[in-house]
Amino acid sequence: MRENRLRTIWQNGGAVLNSWLALPSSFSAETMAHQGWDSLVVDLQHGLIDYAQMVTMLQAISTTATVPIVRVPWLEPGIIMKSLDAGAYAVICPMVNTADDAARLVAYTRYAPQGTRSFGPIRASLYGGPDYAQKANETIVAFAMIETKQALDNLDSILSVDGIEAVYIGPSDLSLALGCRPVFDDVDPPVAEALAHILARCKAHGVKCGVHNGLAEVAKARIAQGFDFVTVSSDARMIASGSQALLKTLKS
Amino acid sequence: MRENRLRTIWQNGGAVLNSWLALPSSFSAETMAHQGWDSLVVDLQHGLIDYAQMVTMLQAISTTATVPIVRVPWLEPGIIMKSLDAGAYAVICPMVNTADDAARLVAYTRYAPQGTRSFGPIRASLYGGPDYAQKANETIVAFAMIETKQALDNLDSILSVDGIEAVYIGPSDLSLALGCRPVFDDVDPPVAEALAHILARCKAHGVKCGVHNGLAEVAKARIAQGFDFVTVSSDARMIASGSQALLKTLKS
Amino acid sequence: MRENRLRTIWQNGGAVLNSWLALPSSFSAETMAHQGWDSLVVDLQHGLIDYAQMVTMLQAISTTATVPIVRVPWLEPGIIMKSLDAGAYAVICPMVNTADDAARLVAYTRYAPQGTRSFGPIRASLYGGPDYAQKANETIVAFAMIETKQALDNLDSILSVDGIEAVYIGPSDLSLALGCRPVFDDVDPPVAEALAHILARCKAHGVKCGVHNGLAEVAKARIAQGFDFVTVSSDARMIASGSQALLKTLKS
Amino acid sequence: MRENRLRTIWQNGGAVLNSWLALPSSFSAETMAHQGWDSLVVDLQHGLIDYAQMVTMLQAISTTATVPIVRVPWLEPGIIMKSLDAGAYAVICPMVNTADDAARLVAYTRYAPQGTRSFGPIRASLYGGPDYAQKANETIVAFAMIETKQALDNLDSILSVDGIEAVYIGPSDLSLALGCRPVFDDVDPPVAEALAHILARCKAHGVKCGVHNGLAEVAKARIAQGFDFVTVSSDARMIASGSQALLKTLKS
Amino acid sequence: MRENRLRTIWQNGGAVLNSWLALPSSFSAETMAHQGWDSLVVDLQHGLIDYAQMVTMLQAISTTATVPIVRVPWLEPGIIMKSLDAGAYAVICPMVNTADDAARLVAYTRYAPQGTRSFGPIRASLYGGPDYAQKANETIVAFAMIETKQALDNLDSILSVDGIEAVYIGPSDLSLALGCRPVFDDVDPPVAEALAHILARCKAHGVKCGVHNGLAEVAKARIAQGFDFVTVSSDARMIASGSQALLKTLKS
Amino acid sequence: MRENRLRTIWQNGGAVLNSWLALPSSFSAETMAHQGWDSLVVDLQHGLIDYAQMVTMLQAISTTATVPIVRVPWLEPGIIMKSLDAGAYAVICPMVNTADDAARLVAYTRYAPQGTRSFGPIRASLYGGPDYAQKANETIVAFAMIETKQALDNLDSILSVDGIEAVYIGPSDLSLALGCRPVFDDVDPPVAEALAHILARCKAHGVKCGVHNGLAEVAKARIAQGFDFVTVSSDARMIASGSQALLKTLKS
């Protein structure tokens, strides 16, 4: 089975440089994949993307060595399993708030006996290889999103769930949960504390920790802080900020 | 943030004139939006429409002042939040049968601390404006559908849920629930009574009340009866009834 | 091979009752096909429809006995042959202005030796049957549109071209060509004269004559006048006029 | 209402010859439907197909007498009801593990008073006929998939649920559940025993029993064994195995 | 009819700030349109976009005041007229190499008697207004691309064609034509001379002159040089260059 | 620039094993590409495929080493250039009947000074590499289809056109042109003679010669006969013939 470069990078002590796809287009996905990102997330939750568009985006990413990841809209078995069958090598699942949520996430992403994932890796076996059935459980990565007050309260029990190997933090939802402004980078102090706390508990549990960022400088600082996976910007943001910069020059 | 004209019309004591989109086409949506309806519902439940098609339909409606509404397929957080992120200014949710259902609907459509909606208004902030995060909770409208025997039994507790501001009645499902023929307009007496009862309880609770209709005359009578939001016909029905009328003339 | 009901109706001395598809949707096409029209035109010229959408619309029409017709965007062999391969049983071709244009239209729609249509009836043979190759030339109908001053001047030479069996008149383009208002029904006198003239010359040449109409009453009068094929309204028009009628009642 | 040929075949004592659609294409669906299969399953679970593509595939199947079936991704009311509204004459539902699951499946697929299916058969009434509302409950077939250890343990209680008329077995998932290799045809002995056991209990309860197969020879043996519905291969598999056979000849 | 802001800007002595859409996505188009560009070009020639995707992109642009323009793939009447019918307020046509080419471009974009555009502004009249038929000829702008040696040789005769109001220069094709490297900004001296020559002849003929650029600084200099319409970058380039900049920071 | 394996195979004295894509699906394309074909043709002429679907199919093929080829619908510069910009490494062009046709095909597929291809290799440079502009002319292959009586008459002048490196024969069209039955494999004697004649003239001119086949045995014989490129079957045919074989077994 094709290796999961997320695991390889982590085994080598590195941090994954990830970006984000919110545009429903296989060509923007392919263009992004050719720029050198370690991985790309097809965002089915807040991106304007649905399953059929995701499939063509995963195909486009597969023309390169970039790792294809899907953020699913919710902790719902149908779409999680469909994303994996379509060839996602990792899923990021929103709103994992309890140990029970975490256990369900593990179950939905693993074949029996570790889980209850239904068998039918229709495109995954084209992408991963003919031994997909044997090696998928040890190859696929499931990220549990920690982004609510409840998840913070249950953090240690979530991180203790067998099979939880990685978490992902969305600073804007975490900020809302803590009564702060919904931003990515310049977070309020309670959010900064929460981020540091989650990272520390992940290290204690041997769980990888990822975080969403807007700016490259902030992402770089997060790596220095110990984060294992950093997202920077998105295709849609690059279009907006790129246009703003060009128009500023033109009108200056 | 762009105003929600549903609220403006209601504040002015008026009733919303709404129609329905069952065809999966951004062009039929744009054509309908140019005719002068106050609002249009993209029907993800019984319309032949899915999320990706809905996005282009919401864009098409946004070329006019018509309010974009989505009826979601079910009380499921993934699609409710995706519809709002895509720019729906109201959602209609089927089968709200208990106070707990109603509380979940409120939670899924409001940001913390009032609810648990996840943050990422990717198109909604283009449509609504940069202050979407601050004002969405007071702008978006969530309609709870009252259409089962169980919902009728729980009506007062549903209407008492904090954040329930509007209900919507589908006479055909309500008819089936009461053992009557599934029709929109010419409802059987038990359904007529149920409609009047729901309207009365809404008035008592200060909740807006909407209803689905086939014919304009019936909708007009519903407004006179006190309903705050009336749907008339749909794009698919206009094509069918329009063709029938033309063929009748041709063959006469 | 499945019969072409256009030919059957004409052999029985009848006129074809046709409507028009401008919405790019297989479901509106299927809904229209279930209303009882003899035939439906998928309009690739002025409808908002392209080839891939046309294919699903032809499939939808094929669930009924309604004859599938395509109006192509231009006298261009690529799209004419693709429309036939996809199962159209007739094509309407705009702007046939000379005998040479007419001869090219015949050539593009017939297999050798009568024409130069390339062989590959991929869906047409599913729809038409396994003997499609043998019988297509005598089954398919090609309509040449007469809608310019130049076409009027060349009318008899166009109608004399071997293989030209039917023409179609778009009154709005014909009106523009004659310096009149671009309307369908209530045409200016020079257009009315031109229509009568074209019809008379068609009768003289044994060529079938079709015409575009907005209203059923006008179409009915055209049949009485001798036209063999009348179009009435379109899916998009039914949505617009249907909405206008409903809103008028609601606001009265 | 158009008959459900599954029921007709069963009433005549026959077994249904079914194949499988994993490619998201209305044209592959139409091509398959023209080959003479009794029924075809549009696989929304492990096929690379979503709802909007399914709609065009159901339309394509409807150009023939082949019965359109949908395998839904999960026991979730939104997509089950949308599949039926779009004209599926049967649904196959994965992972029905308890009597409660089975009761929910029955409820989601039947109108009141037998179930809670919401009313709006938008395309189903085009396909089925104007009396769809009256006859859908007795026409539509719901298959419960028996494919886990838990389902085996609960088999008799599942088969006893009022309205459960058919089950479907996926040998690969059942194999994983029993600690065996995930294959279709050449199953390990414990799986073979489980298959025989399920079939026997179905016969005892008067429930129809279907099974997934790769090879025609195996399917034929299953019919001889008493199965009522056999799936053979899929469009995607025919492309892969067809190519392998051709290349073997070319390179020999 | 809605004004064409290109003409308004030009009447006020300004230059149009334009950007470019190569991604086939209505959401990237809408995001771009919200950034404040005067106009946006949907590129059907070298962008990965076809007609059906263009329609949704024109709708998305129409949610703002940005002027929608289409670059067609070739001087072919079918797609030129379809683009205008879909609501484009200007078309850019490649490879206009002779006065005859220029005359055909004028003809295809104007209604009779000035041209031969076929009548059917199906979406254009929704976007432009009910008086579209009367005012389209004086509102729509057609850009003829000057990008070959032949076009340079015929420049004055092209610019003399009645109805040619604007030209557009693609420096990369012009460079290839002159035996130079195909670049946008840092053009070789013969290309710089040709650009200056075309601009001078346009001024002499009273024809507006546009030019494609990569960098904002170059575009700004082009405005200072007298160009009336400058394109800067594209959505696809912003994604690529944005990613490159972010990765450079991350890896520094 | 990525090598064109067609040229590599030919330089090594081999014949290219090619198959055909008529289904508009990126997943069937990807499945076919994983089976080991040297190249695959996306058929825009007789396949049910248009440009936008072709793009996702080229992306899917690019996940493997299989060479992506496009058969365009007609000798029309717009679609030929769009196919190349999207990353096709060869085009097959129907109905090249004269030396002038052949010269136009060469011109449309080469940059200046050898041709008039417009510059904008938007996806081609992602697929081919950053030196695409420099090496495209010597990498891309253009196949001229010889399939009419006229082309046979002009064969030597066509093969003498500078830049014509390959021809492709469609036996069914050639058969029609010669008054024979339109078949692929079991051609009538005049067609067999014509095939041998074309092959001999190609050898004389140093032009590669390809041919369409249905069966692998026939293709193998064609290679032995000296053909350089053989097509076998198609995705759609494999589905049809695969189903027929399975049903025969089931019903035996």
Image (cartoon, coloured by chain):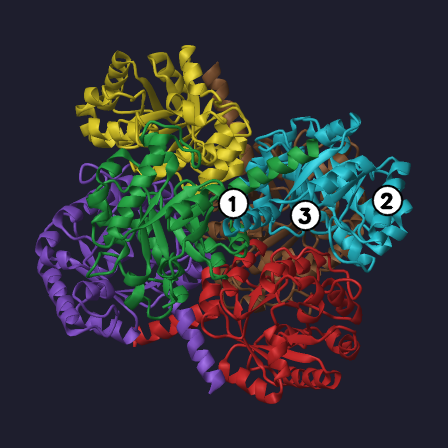
Chain colours: A yellow, B purple, C red, D green, E brown, F cyan
Query: On the picture, is E9 further left or further right than F190?
Result: left
Disc 2/disc 1 C-alpha distance (Å): 36 Å
Q: Indicate which label's residue lies in the foreground, 2 or 3.
A: 2
- In the picture, the disc for residue F79 is 3
Give the residue number, with chain letter if any, for mark 2.
F196
| Residue E190 lies in quadrant | top right
Q: Position of residue C225 (x, y in %)?
A: 61, 88
Q: Could you tell me which chain the residue with mark 2 belongs to? A: F
Q: Quadrant of the N terminus of chain D?
A: bottom left
Q: Is residue A10 left or right of residue C48?
A: left
Inspect the image, locate mark 2, and give the three-letter code of the amino acid beneath it.
Answer: Ala
* Label 3: chain letter: F
Mark 1, secondary structure of its residue:
helix
Farthest bottom residue? C224
**Relative to B168, is F37 above or below?**
above
Secondary structure at numbered mark 3: helix
Residue at the farthest front position: D224
Q: What residue would you read off at disc 1?
A: D235
Q: CA distance from mark 2 to mark 3?
A: 31 Å
**Which residue is nearer to you in this view: B109 or A131?**
A131
> Which is more N-terminal, label 3 or label 2?
3
Disc sitting over residue F116 in the figure = none
Task: Using the image as rendered, state which of residue F144 and residue F130 is in the foreground.
Answer: F144
C-beta proximity under 8 Å, tags 2 and 3: no
Amino acid bearing label 1: Asp
Seen at 28% across and 47% down, the residue is D202
Q: Position of residue D207 (x, y in %)?
A: 28, 51
Amino acid carrying mark 3 in the image: Ile
| Image mark 1: chain | D
